[in-house]
Image (cartoon, coloured by chain):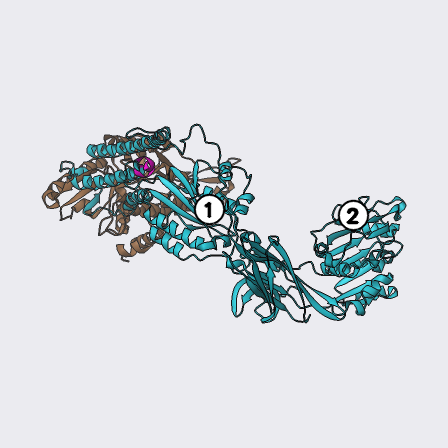
Chain colours: A cyan, B brown
Amino acid sequence: MSFLNPFLWLGLIGVIAPLWLHLRNKPEKNVVYFSAMRFLEDQALPRRRPLQLRDILLFSLRLLALLLLVAAFSWPYLRKDSPIVVTETRVYILDNTLSNQVDDGFAGDRERIRQAIAKSGQEIQDAVIELTVQPRQLVHFSDSHDEADRKLAGLTPSFQRGSYLEAFRMAGALFDQSLGERKKIIMYGDNQENQWNECANPLPFLREVEVSMPDTPAFQERPNLFLAEPVVQRFFLAGKTYVDFAAILGHMGSVEKAVVSLRVNQQEITRQEINLVNEPEKLTIRMQWESDPALCMQAEATVTGLPDDLPADNRIYISLPPVNEGKIALMAQSPYLRTALSPDVMRGKWTARLLDPSQLASEVSANETADLLLIESHYLQSTHARALVSRYLSNGLGVILFVDRATPVINGFLRELGFEVSSPENSQVVREKPQTFRFVATDHPIFKPFLSPDFGSLVETKVFRYVRLKSSEAVPLIFSDSGDALLFETLKGRGRMLLFAFGLDRGQTELPLQAAFVPFLDLCLQHARFSGKPQLSLEPSDLCMIEVPGDGMVSQVAVSRGKDILVTARVDKDKRVQFRAPPLPGNYAITYDNEPIVQQVLSVNPSPRESQLKYTMNSDAVKSWQLPVRQDSKPTATIETRPGELSIWERRTILQQRIWWWLLVAGFGALGIEMLCLFLRKERV
Amino acid sequence: MRFDPQKLAAFSGLQLKARYIMEGFLGGIHGSPFHGLSVEFSEYRDYQPGDDLRHLDWRLFARSDRLCIKRFEQETNARCYVICDTSASMRYRGDQAWGSKMECAQALATALSWILLKQNDAVGLMALDAKNVAEEAGPPLPEAGDQMLRMVSPSQKPNQFGILLGHLEALRTAGGPRLATLLTHAVRLMHRRSLVLFFSDLLEPSDTVELMFKQFRFYGHDCAVFQVLDRDEMEFPFANPAIFQDLETEQRRHIQPREVRETYLARFGQFMAAYSELFRQLEIQHCLVRTDEDPVGALMAFFNTRSRLK
């Protein structure tokens, strides 16, 4: 029984009609209500025909209403003989990911689905799911063939990546609303190998559903040339600013040469030919060029070469925001730290202001604050220093704390911050053998650049003395050989804090002597500076969240390309804004409140997994999604029944419908008795 | 003073109608002849310790130095019952009438109650109501099948008129013949001799009604019947053929008024003559009230006849 059934609504109208007639039934005309009828008792009784006719009309209407209701409830039974019986439900999955653009695969699949829907009769329900980053139901069961054709014709190839599994899950859910006994999913896609690998081993979710994939891959692999995973950052050297760019150049098949060109701010700065013979499938290309740090950099790298079956992934977009000089409030005696933060080293990136310990009270109450506070723990003996740390954190600013000393007062403050000092007698641990940075969270933004050998190595850094700290809230980022955490990251209040378990002193560590010290310090400062650093490199239609800095005056964020505003989103109370990235690759400007100033640049690039043009037919995965067939249910594979013979499932359905029949016939009988009583009463009168 | 039935119909409240009728009545007779009806002086008797000093005649004491108590013809006031028929036939209202028969009866009953209460008589009420109407109206009352007896005990309290007015206004016509039932209950519930004022159209063919009137007289009650009728009932002025439906039984007849008018009037005359004869025999005052006429006339006729009988 479905509420979509038109008979149900006809039945409803049939029920309402007699009620409406009752309500609008006007008083009879030509009837005199008289009190002295005792003197007229011998006069003739009136003819009953008009009354009968009226009652018969009402009776007919009630009867009609009941019959319509019966028809509505018994629809599944009636439809056995109906010329528009729905016997099969088909859900088509149309792969509209980037990889299916190879050889116009998407266009071909779309045409095949259009033809299949046009050919399907009224006994087949059709729905189409478009596989993109978020699978969506493009054609609904209720759509006509013309409407479905129009919707399919309006589709354009996308640059997105979507999950096969999600599309199949959606298709499985659609069958709950379907009428057909036979359920079928028809997948039109390119059968990318990595798609099937990602779908391995989920819990079964398809019940009694046939799955067919007409597109059998003709090749195991297609030639392709692509650029992916761009990494770009600035660095400062000898008073100049440079941009370091790295990306993966991938090639599959028999590509021998590729030409890589780079355009920065509309100007081509390099064009380079690369020989790919006997090279691995993925190469890292790296380029450096001098750049004005005050300018926003937007660039695109392009690779060309033949044979290339998927040209859409030959271009990647990168961007860098202009450098804003950060302000640091410094309370440290370490000469290394003071030197590293001096204008000679950090000019253009960081400006350090040394705080006078005797003037801390005025510093605490002052309105002016820096972006960051660098402090050594022995200053925390002062109440004002502790208040200063708390103020920075509560204001959403960054704090980097070097625990070079542990006293009861300092330990108490650390406990407030969520750290527990577990060193014996609250003093620093001195190991016989110097500890090194044994385990490092390499995926963390501070350490990720060190995966490249150009940034130097931190692994050999030795630590001689440190304070053993434990925390249930903070995330340890570096562990020593003995397993003690040497660096923590924690979010306190609205601010972010990095806590080193040692001081930057020669007696405690040799980190300042490492070549990687300054870049490491710079990365630490950048990371602690603003927690709302947006994810500025996205895939098409990816979900993006930006934390808006400032005093909360920004109410709307717009994403635009040229003069076209593509996305607008409102800032929530937590100063965050969430939106979907544009569907096409490119660099997009982010502006606040319709102001022309570009605050950030968003780079949208295709997923590198879409460039892997390797194919397979993984029917095992589809089988593993199927739930076991119920014993009492009709197996999908054996639908055929002999003419005139009903299957178990059909018999049960009809039986259920018969119950409805009897109930409604009983209602009809009650209505008839009511009418009979009415007639008898009138007869007696 | 002349009274226009249409003008009377314009009054919405029963109290206003009653006042209107009362003022007309008093203006018409130029002073009420019934003032002090129940406080007539009878005789003197010697004072006994414990007698109410209010009744001591101080003038006599001054003249004769004797302490005497004034005695009156009737120590207590008269008890009056207003009995109102609420059968569905009382709902009828003809084209010329200023109100339905029920409304007319209510107005007359109110006016008479007022007169009686003004002369310090105790007035009560009896009527039959449909069960649901009676339950909404107030405290529980004796049941009579699917009907309930609405009864207000006779009293001369200052607020008695308000109570009577409320109950009279709440009366609704419903159901079939119920006069016989009402009279049966009334006979059973009246223990002292009382003045009984009936308001009914008497359009109920029942021997019980006749029997009950006889019983009323047997128990010594002073009865007066206000037969409220419509012009249509008395003259049958209908012209066009129509289906007539009885208000009480819902029985329908196809009537050709021109053909049946004579028969109807003859039967109606017999009906009225029979009741007139009955009331004459039982010495019950019979007062005919038409709903298209001024009710003051009916009141005047009632009191004139009553003074003659006295």
Badge 2 crowding class, 10 Å Cα cut-off, few under 14, some 14 to 19, many 20 or more, is: some
Question: Please, what secondary structure does the residue beneath circle 2 have?
Answer: loop
Q: The magenta stretch spans which residues?
A: A70-77
Q: Nearer the viewer, residue B171 or B154?
A: B171
Between label 1 and label 2, give the one nearer the viewer.
Answer: 1
- Report in which chain the residue with disc 2 lies: A
Q: Nearer the viewer, residue A595 or B124?
A: A595
Residue at the extreme left of the image, as rendered: B259
Q: In the picture provided, is A481 more to the left or to the right than B226?
A: right
Rendered residue at 68%/71% (across/down):
A292
Q: In the picture provided, is A414 more to the left or to the right than A188?
A: right
Relative image position of residue A268 (x, y in whole percent): 59, 70
Q: Which residue is mark 2?
A: A438
- Quarter of the rendering containing residue A338: bottom right
- Report in which chain the residue with disc 1 lies: A
Between marks 1 and 2, how big is the CA–CA gap? 47 Å
Q: In the picture provided, is B233 more to the left or to the right than A489?
A: left
Question: Please, what secondary structure does the residue beneath circle 1 have?
Answer: loop
Q: Which residue is mark 1?
A: A217
Asked if the residue at tag 2 contacts the one at tag 1, i.e. Cβ–Cβ closer than 8 Å, the answer is no
